[in-house]
Amino acid sequence: MRTRAEMADGRELIYFDDVTTDRTVLPDTRDLPRVRHGSTMRFDVLTGEWVAIAAHRQDRTYMPPADHCPLCPTQPGREPSEIPAEDYDVVVFENRFPSFSADAPVVAPEIDGNPLWPQRPAVGRCEVVCFTSDHTASFGSLAVSRVRTVIEAWADRTAALSALPGVEQVFPFENRGREIGVTLQHPHGQIYAYPFVTPRTATLITRAGAHRQRTGRDLMGDVLDAERKSGARVVLDGEHWTCFVPAAARWPVEAHLVPHRAVPDMAALDEAERDELAELYKDLLHRLERYFGEPAELPYIAGWHQAPVHTGRDLTRLHLQLFSLRRAPGKLKYLAGSESGVGAWVNDVAPEQIAENLRAAGS
Ligand SMILES: [Zn+2]
């Protein structure tokens, strides 16, 4: 169930409850000034990629103590948090320090009037998704019914953000663990609505377009069928979803979760697909926590790749890319010269071994 509210500085906040309840919306009593957004984006003519410049984000909250957590429910007698409710299931709200926003300032089309340096307002939206009111929980520890509510929130926000003017791609993701650069401990993810098609998605579409022209077939569908037929890298095989380690995995731990039906995004998933996704995703996170034997928190990035809003929607499909930088207990893979410098990846772990470890972590 979905209930909309407004924050003290005018940002939108939406409650998603596990069951239908009569949620009383409490007012946000803070004296909170509107943040002046200065986000712009600059085009790198050498690579053809946009870079967002969001200098105002330097001032954002960094690892506050637990009793000042902005994502915990507001407790009576305590300083109000971002969420003016005594409890909640899942809540989504606009980021106070967004990289992309609807009120990004208008800028000249070129820096210094030079056509080599195009720039544009960083129009779009960034939202925060709180998965639970429990500060010490993790996504993997949530009940399947709560994971299902999060999926409902992702689907709802994907549809809503896709409808915003200028938005070209919606990307829900979770960064988990200090090692990834998480600035708040509370279990949460984010959704970025970009005013351009992101580089990875643009590449996927180019590759899939060439494959279709050559074979008349769907590239992601062919990869999925081949992985299921081989089985060497399959971790979970459901009725509607299959989880496998990609044949050319680039991270020391990496898995993809792909729907059998070619759906462009979360909003296009039917009830049965959402139900099974809740179970399989929880199962996958559970395996991640046991990847190196003893249950331990593995830092990870979970990215939900979705088809662009306006272009190439039939060329790619919704899929999860989940990966960790941890290559061994206590050891991280750093993106150094080869990966960061020229984008050439070296993986020290065979993808078949990653799949074997993920399968073993479930038993
Ligand atoms: Zn918290």
Image: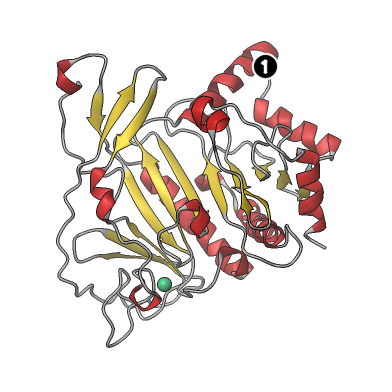
Q: Label 1: which residue?
A: 216
Provide residue 201's location: percent of width, then percent of height. 51, 30
Provide residue 91's location: percent of width, then percent of height. 40, 65
Element assignment for label 1: loop
Query: Is there any visible trace of residue 28 in the rendered image?
Result: yes
Residue 202 against residue 46 in the figure, above or below = below
Q: Quadrant of residue 29?
A: bottom left
- Quadrant in the picture for the C terminus: bottom right
Q: Quadrant of residue 330?
A: bottom right
User: In this rendering, would 61 be left or right of 136?
Assistant: left
Provide residue 156's location: percent of width, then percent of height. 44, 53
- Quadrant in the picture for the N terminus: bottom left
Ligand 1 is found in the corner quadrant, namely bottom left
Provide residue 266's location: percent of width, then percent of height. 53, 47
Q: Specify the farthest residue to the top.
A: 214
Query: Is there any visible trace of residue 109 in the rendered image?
Result: no
Q: Residues within 10 Å of mark 1 (few under 14, many from 20)?
A: few
User: In this rendering, would 332 be left or right of 240?
Assistant: left
**Picture residue at 34% right of the left edge, 59% below the top:** 93
